[in-house]
Image (cartoon, grey):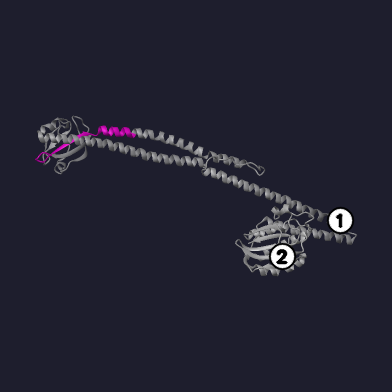
Amino acid sequence: MRSLRSRLVVIFAVGSALTLLLGLGGLYALVDLRLRSALDTELSYRSADLAASITVREGRIVRSDPLAQLYTADGALIAGSPSLNGHRLLSEEQVRFTDQPWMTDAETRIGHSTGTVPLRVEARRVGTSGEVLAVAASRRVIDRASLSALVGLVAAAPLLIVALSGAGWLVVRAALRPVDALTREAAAISSFDHDRRLPRVAGDDEIARLATTLDGMLDRLRVAFERERAFVDDASHELRTPIAVLRGELELALTALDDPAEVEQSLRAAQTQAVRLTRLAEDLLLLAGDPVAVREPVELLAFTAAETPALGRVVGLRIETTGSPVEAPVDADRLRQVFTNLAGNSAAAGAGAVRVTIGHDEAGALIEWADDGPGFPPALLGSAFDRFVRGDAARARGSGAGLGLSIVRAIVTAHGGTVQAGNGAPLGGAVVTVRI
């Protein structure tokens, strides 16, 4: 039974059967108890009436009762119903030990029958001489009624179990119908079904919440898929140009083997493209995974003041560091990469000076990188950290792949921080704010 529906139906059927059998057993026991109680009550009334008659009149009244006997205190039979033919209802020992009224079950022969009859007997003392009166009633009617009730319950039990199992199957089928619909629809959705959604389930139960959760998960997967596909498309586009240039330079070198100067020029150009390809591949690999940040306490003001002057000389920037000492858990190597990419972005935009301000606010450590360049194009402020985003030729002199700021965001995110882009004070150009 691999089907959840089958398992639920079986569990429901077994549980219902056990509950039903227990209920029917209790009902049979209750019916039997009520019948026997009614018999005992009727027998007590008969015995009390007969005892009163014996006290007022003589013991001959016992012979007129269908099933009664009167005994002396020591157990001798005084009188009894003719139908008993002298067969005793109580033994001598039972008579001698009778003090209070009590009841018992017995079997004896009645009339001229050869078999015994099941009886219910009540014994009590009567009169002033300690006589004992025994009055009996047949249990056959009670036993037959109990047996009829038992047969009826046993015959009805399988039908009730089948009916309950069928009802359980219908209930489980109705409850799991939305799950079947969700399963079929989810199996039919492929990576090309961008706008296809799971069917909505009415209500606010567990299945409806599951459908909503799965639909939200599909939306997130759809966004991630589109983002990764765009990443692959952009990466393919960026790789195509340097590969084509590299191939062309190598072919040119092969056709000019007799001209060493031409060969050298082609090989140097090919080397430049190979370096560009290497750097692009490294950046793509970093963005494809999650940058690992080995975080240790670093005093940011001293670290920035020590690292940025040499970096400025490499890219042609005057970098000034200001602010207050702040210690934060960061990966020093990754932070150097952040400064390198920000410096490269400022230099490519045509900036000449950079001011790095270290501070802190309620969100944590604060690093503000501001340059005096033209700033971010207004149309790109919302997407400056997206992959392969570059400014136009009037604002950017470099020919990078547009991954520098994307790497900055990836590294800051790995530190649990945020990064924002803006324009304005203090130098009037681009401003990148990093919070860790």
- Give the magenta part as a residue range: 126-150
Left of 211 or right of it: where is 266? right
Q: Is residue 46 above or below residue 241?
A: above
Task: Name the image quarter holding residue 431.
Answer: bottom right
Residue at 66 percent across and 58 percent down: it is 419
Left of 377 or right of it: where is 122? left
Q: Position of residue 232 (x, y in %)?
A: 71, 51
Q: Position of residue 343 (x, y in %)?
A: 73, 63
Task: Name the image quarter holding residue 347.
Answer: bottom right
Residue at 60 percent across and 47 percent down: it is 217
Query: Is residue 138 one of those drawn in magenta?
Result: yes
81 and 398: which is toward the camera: 398
Residue at 45 percent across and 42 percent down: it is 11
Residue 252 numbered tag: 1
- In the picture, the quarter occupied by the C terminus is bottom right
Q: Position of residue 53 (x, y in %)?
A: 12, 33
Disc 2 residue type (three-letter): Arg
Left of 174 or right of it: where is 356? right
Under circle 1, the secondary element is helix
Q: Is residue 306 above or below residue 28?
A: below
Foreground tag (2 vs 1): 2
- The number of numbered badges drawn on the structure is 2
Q: Position of residue 66 (x, y in %)?
A: 17, 31
Left of 1 or right of it: where is 339? right
Q: Mark 2: few, some, or many residues within 10 Å (few <14, many ≥20)?
A: some
22 and 420: which is toward the camera: 420
